[in-house]
Image (tube, rainbow, N blue to C red):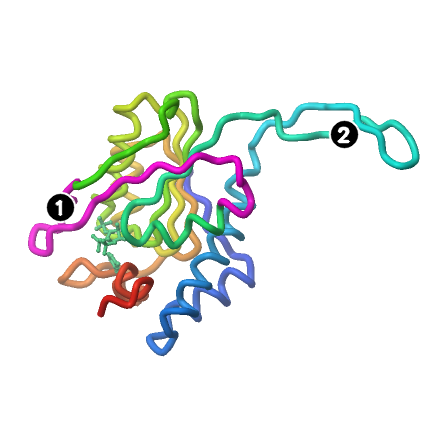
Amino acid sequence: MTNVTLFDHPLIQHKVAMLRDKNTNTKDFRELVTEIAMLMGYEATRDLPLKEVEIETPISKAKVNMLSGKKVGIVPILRAGIGMVDGILSLMPFAKVGHIGLFRDEKSLEPVEYYCKFPKDVEERDIIILDPMLATGGSASAAIKLAKKSGVKNIKLMCIIAAPQGIKKINEDHPDVHIFCAALDEKLNENGYIVPGLGDAGDRLFGTK
Ligand code: PRP
Ligand code: URA
């Protein structure tokens, strides 16, 4: 698992534990997803390039480091990925946002595409694909394929809970993509849900069940 960063930060672990609890309500669930995404985003943006610039403090001139202006994009997989957008945008308000609409066919578990819109200059951007759940990996792999087809070269995947099958699929299909996840769970059940997981992320975020 060379291209996986698994977060062990106590704040992230605590918030993921609350997220898993079936008694956590929709409002708290949404807030927790935002907070976890922001904390993960801090690490996932560690390689953003800096440039040295000269500014003046109230005391003297100073050479300081600022972001070099590298173009970044974030791409949530609809629906559940939307929950992670605000957390990342609070760190990088300059990022452009694309959207990929995919749902899993309930029987085959294969992803079905229904929407795709990227920023105009997406091929010039490094992108982070967002989805709280990496189960079979089918949705994330399809999303990465769409981004590559549009010319994106540098892609990261950020999920909150991953199953071993999902990590394996991304490693096999897209070995160049680094995965950031907050928890690695045991397995998938017969319906393709992550065990212990947190249930259906989209339904819990939007209160649709
Ligand atoms: C969920 C989740 C991922 C996908 C993960 O979405 O948000 O996109 O399942 O499963 P996979 O790794 O096996 O592809 P879902 O299809 O339930 O759609 P929704 O977000 O619209 O509810
Ligand atoms: N999608 C979800 O929302 N939850 C799972 O456990 C698996 C796929």
Residue at mark 1: 110
* Res 117 quadrant in image: top left
Does the magenta run of residues contain 159? no
In percent of width and height, residue 56 lies at 84, 29
Task: Determine the image quadrant of residue 121.
Answer: top left
Q: Earlier in the sequence, mark 2 or mark 1?
A: 2
Q: Quadrant of the N terminus?
A: top left
Which dot, 2 or 1, sits closer to the camera? Answer: 2
- The span picked out in magenta is 89-113
Quick one: quadrant of the C terminus?
A: bottom left
Position of residue 180 measured from the top left corner of the image (x, y, whole percent): 43, 45
Image position of 39 (left or right of 154): right
The residue closer to the viewer here, 192 or 88, is 88
> How many C-alpha atoms fall within 10 Å of the one at disc 1: few (<14), some, or many (≥20)?
some
Residue labelled with disc 2: 64
| Separation of residues labelled 2 and 1 (CA atoms) | 49 Å
Residue 4: image location, x then y, percent: 42, 43
Q: Nearer the viewer, residue 133 or 26?
A: 26
- The answer to whether residue 173 is above or below residue 134 is above
